[in-house]
Image (cartoon, helix red, strand yellow):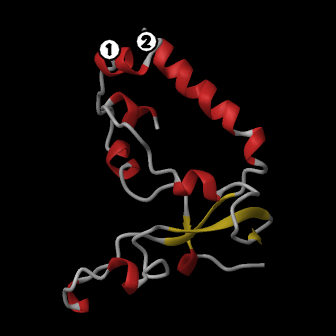
Amino acid sequence: MTLALAMGADFLMLGRYFSRFDESPTDKVKVNGTYYKEYWGEGSNRARNWQRYDLGGARKLSFEEGVDSYVPYAGPLKDNVQTTLAKIRSTMCNCGSLTLPEFRETAKLTRVSATSIVEGGSHDVILKDRLGRD
């Protein structure tokens, strides 16, 4: 979230973030003793709805962009959103910023390892086809 805001984003796509909470309509499942919530990306096969996405082109031109997976269960949203906002404010303060416009001016982004490339893809999810359920 903070990276996107630092780079000038006016809004964030937070599907994976919100899918972890009780308020998400997906099922909570227990996998190997740990609770998860189902999650699928907007561009996944599961989310496809041709009435919604058809731009008049051939279906053969479509491709899957999202994943069908599980994310770690995080409990009620009200118990977590304040922590998330505090982390964003903390990061902004670490950059010497009190407002979003200041943050965009003062933040400096640095790639620190090959892990950052991995983080740019799907992360913090367990792909369903790689995991057995209880």
In percent of width and height, residue 30 lies at 78, 69
Question: Where does label 2 land, which residue?
Answer: 97
Determine the residue located farthest toward the top in the rendered image. Answer: 96
Query: From what the image shows, is residue 26 above or below residue 81?
Result: below
**Horizontal arrangement in the rendering, residue 133 relative to residue 19 (left or right):** right
User: Is disc 2 surrounded by few (<14), some (14 to 19) or many (20+) residues within 10 Å?
Assistant: some
Residue at position x 29%, y 80% from top?
Answer: 63
User: Left or right: 62 with respect to 71?
Assistant: left
Q: Height in image: 19 above or below 66?
A: above
Q: Position of residue 11 (x, y in %)?
A: 41, 41
The answer to which quarter of the image holds residue 109 is top left
* Placement of the C terminus among the 4 image quadrants: bottom right
C-alpha gap between disc 1 and disc 2: 7 Å
Q: Nearer the viewer, residue 10 or 115?
A: 10
Q: Establish if 48 lies above or below 96.
A: below
Q: Residue at x 76, y 41 (%)?
A: 78
- The reply to whether callout 1 and callout 2 are in contact (CB within 8 Å) is yes
Expressed as whole percent of the image width and height from the top left, the position of residue 129 reads 54, 81
Q: Which residue is mark 1?
A: 106
Residue drawn at x 67%, y 38% as measured from the top left: 81
The type of residue carrying mark 1 is Thr
The amino acid on which the numbered mark 2 sits, given as a three-letter code, is Ser
Q: Is residue 131 above or below residue 91?
A: below
* Mark linked to residue 56: none
Q: Residue at x 36, y 28 (%)?
A: 6
Left-right relation of 39 to 102: right
Q: Is residue 31 visible?
A: no
Does residue 97 appear to the left or right of 113 in the view shown?
A: right
Q: Going from the N terminus, do you reach mark 1 or mark 2 first?
A: 2
| Residue 72 in sight from this viewpoint | yes
Pinpoint residue 110: horizontal percent, then vertical percent: 29, 28
